[in-house]
Image (cartoon, grey):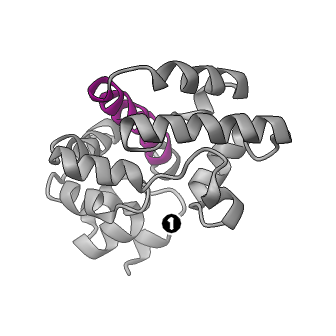
Amino acid sequence: MTEATLAPDLNLNAINALDLDDFIAEFGSIFEHSPWVAEGAWAARPFASIDVLHGAMIGVVRSAPRATQIAFLCGHPELAGKEAEAGTMTTESVGEQASAGLNALSKGEIGELRELNARYLDRHGFPFIVAVRRYSKREIFEQLGERIERDSDTELNEALSQIGTITRLRVQAKVSA
């Protein structure tokens, strides 16, 4: 790995100089368990800005076939779900869920969230995804209840939009302007 990849905050010049393997090493975890997103975005270099970098990455996801998008969504953890209990979520997801208080739910809240998550998954075929850093715990519960009732095409688009918000924050945290 090059010296540039060891910096905690990468700048655009360093990013644009990364070879494919180093680029995947740096950005492969931005999209939950999906290094193929970084791999697909690498060819869009040079990136003129953080927005262009993120846009290339989200473009890879948006242009993927629907079945790939659904499989991608299914790779995301449920809110306060089995991955949280087992300690198998990514570091990013742990911090994001904790920021909304989802790591400190009451027994009643855990039960309600599990029931809502199960209904959502049964209806849409992928887990509920929300940019938790943007909402309070109560707002997250309200959104989940409301979004269960949407049609699955609308909800697929919303889930991808939420991932866009989540990953934009992740890229921003990683890249210095």
Q: Amino acid at mark 1?
A: Ala
Residue 90 visible, this angle: yes
- Image height of 94 relative to 56, above or below: below
Q: Quadrant of residue 107?
A: top right
Q: Residue drawn 71% across and 28% down? A: 137
User: Where in the figure is residue 124, as x and y percent of width and height?
Assistant: 37, 36
- Give the main secondary structure of the magenta stretch: helix
> Residue 1, percent across and down?
38, 81
**Position of 109 relative to 41 (above/below):** above
Mark 1 nearby-residue class (10 Å; few <14, some 14–19, many ≥20) = few
Residue 71, quarter of picture: bottom left
Magenta stretch in the rendered image: 152-171
Residue indicated by mark 1: 7
Q: Is 167 in the magenta?
A: yes
Residue 174: horizontal and vertical position, in percent?
A: 49, 52
Q: With 165 as the anchor, is 81 left or right in this view?
A: right
Q: Decide whether residue 81 is among the magenta residues.
A: no
Q: Nearer the viewer, residue 30 or 176?
A: 30
Which residue ends up furthest to the bottom in the rendered image? 1
Identify the residue at horizontal 38%, vertical 60% (top origin): 27
Residue at the location (36% across, 31% down)?
Answer: 161
